[in-house]
Image: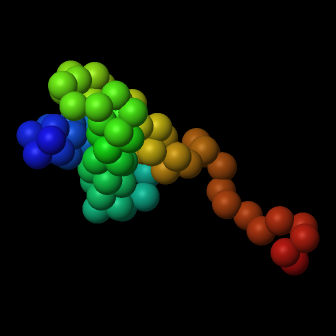
């Protein structure tokens, strides 16, 4: 399980690096992106390992990558649109 955790964290950081490199203008600070990617992948590994049980290392890492990617996708902001206050908030 410890190697799955290290592998998941490394894959989460690799996903974060790719996201920062390709979508830097649409993401918050790089520190937040790296933290979110690593923690999302660790949570995905935990979730997949809990569902499948021991002995499924590759499947656990695949689950970690999927959950890490979904978590990172929640950080992406819309392109070319400024954030404005809603009519109800004014």
Place of residue 90 in the rendered image (x, y in percent of width and height, measured from the top left) = 87, 77
Place residue 7 in its image quadrant: top left
Check the image and name the residue furthest to the left. 3
Point out the image quarter for the N terminus. Answer: top left
Check the image and name the residue furthest to the bottom. 90
Place of residue 49 in the rendered image (x, y in percent of width and height, measured from the top left) = 30, 36
Taking the spot 35% from the left edge, 61% from the top edge, the residue there is 32
Give whichever of 54, 44 is nearer the camera: 54
Place residue 36 in its image quadrant: bottom left
Place of residue 61 in the rendered image (x, y in percent of width and height, measured from the top left) = 24, 30
Place of residue 60 in the rendered image (x, y in percent of width and height, measured from the top left) = 27, 30
Taking the spot 34% from the left edge, 28% from the top edge, the residue there is 52
84 sits to left or right of 44? right
13 in relation to 58, above or below: below
Check the image and name the residue furthest to the front. 53
3 sits to left or right of 47? left
Taking the spot 58% from the left edge, 42% from the top edge, the residue there is 79
Place residue 68 in its image quadrant: top left
């Amino acid at each position: 399980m410890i190697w799955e955790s290290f592998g998941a964290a490394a894959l989460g950081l690799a996903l974060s690096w790719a996201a920062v490199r390709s979508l830097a203008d649409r993401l918050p600070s790089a520190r937040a992106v790296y933290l979110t990617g690593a923690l999302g992948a660790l949570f995905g590994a935990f979730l997949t390992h809990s569902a499948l049980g021991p002995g499924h290392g590759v499947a656990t890492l695949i689950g970690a990558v999927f959950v890490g990617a979904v978590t990172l996708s929640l950080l992406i902001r819309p392109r070319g649109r400024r954030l404005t206050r809603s009519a109800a908030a004014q």
